[in-house]
Image (spheres, rainbow, N blue to C red):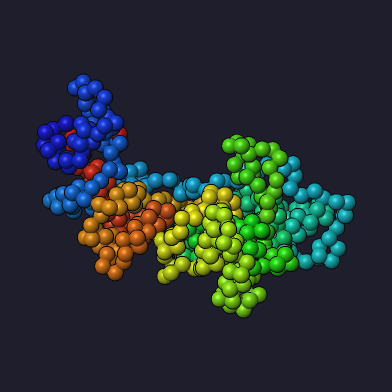
Amino acid sequence: MSNVFLGQLPPFFFHQIFFTPRQSNIIAPQPQYMQTYYTKILSDSMLVWDASTFIQWMADPEWRYFTDLRSWSDEEVIEHLTRDPMANSRHLQCSIPPEDRYFTTKSSTSLGLLGLLPTELLDYLLGLLDIRSLRSFGATCEYALSLTTNQSEYQLLQKLAPTICPLIYLTGLDYLHPIASVSRELRFCYCRSCGERGTLLCLPTCQRICENCAQYNQAYWGLLLSEAKTAFALEEHEVDPLPVLLTNRRMWRGIENGVTHTEPNLEYVTTKSALSAAIQKRGSRQAMIEAAEAISPDRSAEASALAISKALLYRYLRASNPRPANGDPSQVVARLSNVPSTERIGIVTTLFPCVPEGYRMAMPTYRCSGCWVVCNAPFQILNEHYRYMGIEPTSTSPEDRYRIVKGRTLIVRTLEELRYHISHQCLGGKLLMFRRRKMQSDGVVLP
């Protein structure tokens, strides 16, 4: 490693190596290991940035040349500037128990008059059936079984998202949505709430949503029926028509972390459906809020801390909006301390691939590593850095600015969209590019 290269490293780099307490007992490596040692240190400190690093590197004469994406191949961009190939969500993926046979035929020998219809028309009509009705039809006779298993939308789901139909059936939602609606979401790649690319399917609503909205838009959180009745002042008969998801932690977590074989099924609804029912009942959101406040858990002067916490959460849920401000998913980040648990935000969603028309397999999407670089140094970002990322600092509060940056870390993009994002919006991506090209130009062999 040349002295020239060492002289160009920012001061915090040497502080990381020689003065950080957790590394004070490190024995200096021998010369033959120096290359590997410094490469490891650089890798370990990749997310440790400060404002002086931003300023120094952006002022470097080679900044523009090193951060020109035209010199980066697609393979380099994917390997060094992205994370989570295929955008694997942090949400827990449901495990579906194997079924011996999805359809079991009965003794009937024909479809009667239905059998006289053209096959194309039968295929269309079967697509209008929900999964429960489709199962019943497939159990009529062998011909019905053949029509059902070869139905175009059902076959597409079985090939590209084989867990979805069994999951909808096991959670008790198989009576709600036509099979064609589920298939339509497979072809539609964008979040129904904010318009960004979505990687999840909200099971009760059968809508594709993004991870940002699943985590931070309370309209898509899961509520127990008892919570929904209290939060929105609904009666028993008023929650019965809502799309209720039956599930338990074992389905989502497996037999681990204290989850037992006898884990009971619980009934969940989404905030969105409960809110809609409450507003329809009361006539307006304000009337619904007044009715709910009359039975709020914290009305008593002797209310416990748990009751007060629940009341705050319910007020926050009543203020939910299925569509965020300006269609920006970063604007739905929770402002309260009631951060939803994994079960609340993940139990009503599951990973759902996107297969646009003309594709035979899921479209690859990626998250930007550069957004994580900036997000991990929020207090070191100066106003000019925000402007570089397309965020006007004078018209937004520090909380809003950080929320926008944080929201970008969960957005998935195609390779073409990612290239545009790094070129025009992502300071962190440029820093990663500069760092790598600078090290290469100084003779540091990178893995």
- Can residue 222 be spotted in the picture? yes
Residue 111 vs residue 92: left or right?
Answer: right
Q: How many marks?
A: 0
Residue 52 picture location, percent across and down: 18, 49
Along the line of sight, which residue is nearer the eye, 361 or 261? 261
Q: Quadrant of the N terminus?
A: top left
Please give the name of the residue rendered at 20% of the width and 40% of the height, measured from the top-left corner.
12
Residue 150 visible, this orientation: no
Q: Position of residue 34 (x, y in %)?
A: 21, 26
What residue do we see at 26% from left, 60% from top?
Answer: 386
Across and down, in percent, residue 80 comes to 33, 43
Question: In the rendered image, which quarter contains the C terminus?
Answer: top left
Farthest residue, direction bottom = 283
Q: As drawn, is 364 to the left or to the right of 101?
A: left
Going by the image, does 106 lie left or right of 359? Answer: right
Q: Is residue 374 above or below residue 280?
A: above
Residue at image x 29%, y 49%? 377
Tell me the quarter of the picture where residue 307 sits.
bottom right
Query: Looking at the image, which residue is at 30% across and 36% down?
Result: 44
Left or right: residue 283 versus residue 410 is: right
Q: Please state the horizontal and vertical placement of residue 138, each as a whole percent of the image.
A: 77, 55
Q: Nearer the viewer, residue 68 or 117?
A: 68
Judge by depth and name the residue closer to the eye, 282 or 127.
Answer: 282
* Above or below 25: residue 235: below
| Residue 418 picture quarter | bottom left
